[in-house]
């Protein structure tokens, strides 16, 4: 069986606030899951079981240890800012550091930080518990697209990956009004392929490993690469 992630069992849920918690934890302590069911046990030990939902319930617990004030300040701001997490009340986007999927989450519990080094201003947040509410829009994928294929996403604010491996010649991928693209990825494009991103404000990476001759990746007005 292929490797599985929480993403595989969730439907897409829009976040209340269009912000991304992008401070990577030192590690994920726990991915905890369950499914809502009612189970009653009779005096003779027999059970009556009723499934109340097909949607799994997931929680993730993170730890941020020995981090600078800036990193911990970002996490703290996400918790208290009313336009972000607003305590436990508002949902936002979190990117899983190992499976790379985007999840719509909210905080679950209190925020607690510890000052570890007074002179160096080093903090630890011993546990941040997130309730996973659903999957977020992580990628636009055009694997093995044929020639003259076009992928457009004209109004996205944030896209984790614009991915087109093995796109054949004369294909075009356009992203005319993205604010942020984490990765614009086109390995192994054949000759005369073109990837254009004419008005991106920010691109984390443009990857064209393995492109053959005459391939072209253009991003003429990117502010940050």
Image (cartoon, helix red, strand yellow):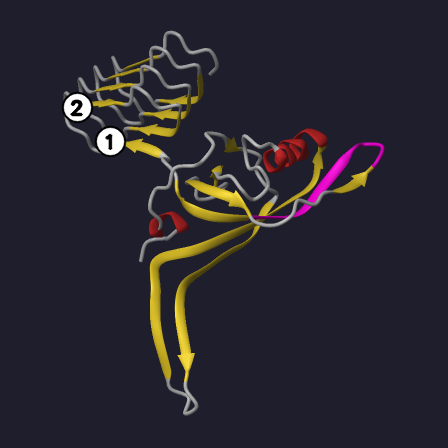
Residue occupying image coordinates x 27% and y 30%: 165
Image coordinates of residue 13 in percent, x first then y, are 37, 41
Residue drawn 44% across and 41% down? 104
- Badge 2 is on which residue? 149
Q: Magenta: predominant secondary structure element?
A: strand
Contact flag, marks 2 and 1 (Cβ < 8 Å): yes
Q: Residue furthest left?
A: 147
Near-viewer residue (82 or 5): 82
Give the extent of the magenta segment. 118-129
- Whether 120 is drawn above or below 36: the answer is above
What is the quadrant of residue 23 in the picture? top right
Using the image, determine if residue 17 lies above or below residue 212. below
Q: Is residue 122 magenta?
A: yes
Query: Quarter-wise, where is residue 214 in the image?
Result: top left
Callout 1 crowding tier (Cα within 10 Å): few <14, some 14–19, many ≥20: some
Asked whether 152 or 17 is in front, the reply is 17
The residue labelled by disc 1 is 142
Q: Position of residue 190 (x, y in %)?
A: 22, 22
The residue that appears at 37% across and 30% down in the rendered structure is 161
């Amino acid at each position: 069986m292929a490797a599985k992630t929480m993403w595989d069992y969730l439907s897409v849920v829009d976040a209340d606030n269009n912000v991304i918690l992008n401070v990577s934890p030192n590690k994920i302590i726990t991915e905890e899951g369950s499914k809502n069911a009612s189970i009653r046990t009779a005096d003779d030990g027999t059970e009556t079981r009723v499934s109340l939902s097909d949607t799994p319930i997931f929680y993730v617990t993170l730890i941020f240890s020995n981090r600078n004030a800036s990193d911990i300040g970002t996490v703290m701001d996400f918790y208290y800012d009313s336009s972000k997490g607003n305590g436990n009340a508002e949902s936002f986007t979190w990117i899983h550091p190992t499976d790379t999927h985007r999840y719509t989450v909210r905080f679950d519990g209190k925020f607690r930080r510890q000052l570890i080094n007074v002179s160096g201003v080093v903090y630890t947040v011993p546990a941040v518990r997130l309730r996973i509410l659903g999957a977020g829009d992580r990628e636009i994928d055009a694997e093995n697209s044929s020639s003259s294929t076009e992928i457009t996403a004209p109004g996205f604010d944030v896209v984790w990956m614009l991915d087109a491996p093995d796109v054949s010649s004369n294909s075009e991928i356009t992203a005319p009004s993205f604010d942020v693209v984490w990765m614009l990825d086109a390995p192994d494009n054949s000759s005369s392929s073109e990837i254009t991103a004419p008005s991106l404000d920010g691109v984390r990476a443009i990857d064209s490993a393995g492109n053959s001759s005459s391939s072209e990746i253009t991003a003429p007005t990117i502010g940050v690469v």
